Amino acid sequence: METIYTFVPSRNHEYPDHPERPGRLEMVEPLLDSFGAERVDAVRASVDEVARVHERGLIAGVEEVCKQGPAVIDHAPTYVTQTSYEDAMLAAGGVITCTRAVMRGEAKNAFAIIRPPGHHAEPDRAMGFCIFNNIAIAAQDALASGMERVMAIDYDAHHGNGTQAAFLHDERAGFISTHQWGIYPGTGWIEDAPHAKKRIANVPLHAYAGDETFSRISDAIFTPMVKSFRPQMLLISVGFDAHWNDPITSLGLSTRGYFNIAKKLAAMAEEYCDGKIVFVLEGGYDPQNVAHGVDSVFGALTNRPLKFEANDPSPHKDPDHEARIAEICKWQGLSSS
């Protein structure tokens, strides 16, 4: 198999008027057979696998509160229903299923299209629409299975605070997050995690940062950090809420911009990781943007043009980020040229 995917829509994980809802994937599901990838069944994560990242008390607490659901469990608001514990365990397992297949050479690359998302969930708490940190759980599974180094790159509109927290003291795990500065969760400044420089990098962005800025960041920050850290697999948290018309954020990517980033990341994996790369769905709250974004990832993974060419350039001017990029490069000890 070349490209595989798992699909975990968690249709009963839903709360009235909440943006993180099953309808996010309503335009994706009818298209899945057309993307040139093979679907594999997600295998539910075990408590022991989740506990490589999360405190067992949190896991047990989530299970218990879900039995009483529905409920709101933090101010984001993060919600649970009676099925959310099992939904979250299957979502985490959907990412593990993909990473194991790629690690073993059973697939070249993969995309875990799952919900609930995970990158805000910290070791001791669920938060930010996220229950368990899917990508961090899969990273720890890969490391426990023999990989020496993995790197997660997160280009959701929000800082991947949970993944950073999970990786903070693990020298085998690298992390880069691009995110709109000043929005939830309010973390992810350049100088976060000073003891983990060259392994953890934060790229806070001005509103309307768009295609050109993300391309520049990929070349100036992603590539040299991947080259330096030498991961054996790239794990990509992709949030389609960085699209310019997402209803809850204010970045400036277009569908073509998403496609170009995914192609750059796939090329990095080819050069530095023997092609091993797994994309994992995080945010994105407009169903059409999510469908077009999923197409952009599959296009990059299967080396084909976009199936649905969306003529959706951002109407906003892409702010100049050269000074910010230079500041990050200086902090990380990278050349900004």
Image: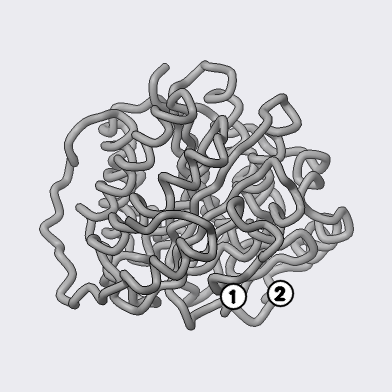
Instruction: Tell how many labels.
Output: 2
- SS category of the residue bearing label 2: strand
Kindly indicate whether the residue at mark 2 contacts the one at mark 1 (C-beta within 8 angstroms): no
Residue 148: name its quadrant. Answer: top right
The quarter in which the C terminus is drawn is: bottom left
Sequence-wise, which precedes: disc 1 or disc 2?
2
Residue 74: name its quadrant. Answer: bottom right
Decide: is 187 above or below 299: below
Q: Residue at x 65, y 61 (%)?
A: 162
Task: From the image, tell me which residue sits under label 2.
Answer: 73
Residue 305: name its quadrant. Answer: top left
Q: Residue at x 70, y 33 (%)?
A: 143
Q: Residue at x 67, y 65 (%)?
A: 194
The quarter in which the N terminus is drawn is: top left
Q: Residue at x 26, y 32 (%)?
A: 34
Query: Which amino acid type is shown beneath numbered disc 1?
Result: Thr
- Residue nearest the viewer, comparing 211 with 124: 211
Tell me the number on the disc at residue 187.
Answer: 1
- The image position of residue 87, as x and y in percent, is 63, 50
Horizontal side of residue 185 vs 169, given as left or right = left
Q: Nearer the viewer, mark 1 or mark 2?
A: 1
Distance between the Cα atoms at labels 1 and 2? 20 Å
- The image position of residue 300, as x and y in percent, is 29, 37
- The image position of residue 72, as x and y in percent, is 67, 76
- Residue nearest the viewer, comparing 273 with 81: 273
Tell me the number on the disc at residue 325.
Answer: none
Decide: is 127 above or below 227: below
Query: Which amino acid type is shown beneath numbered disc 2?
Result: Ile
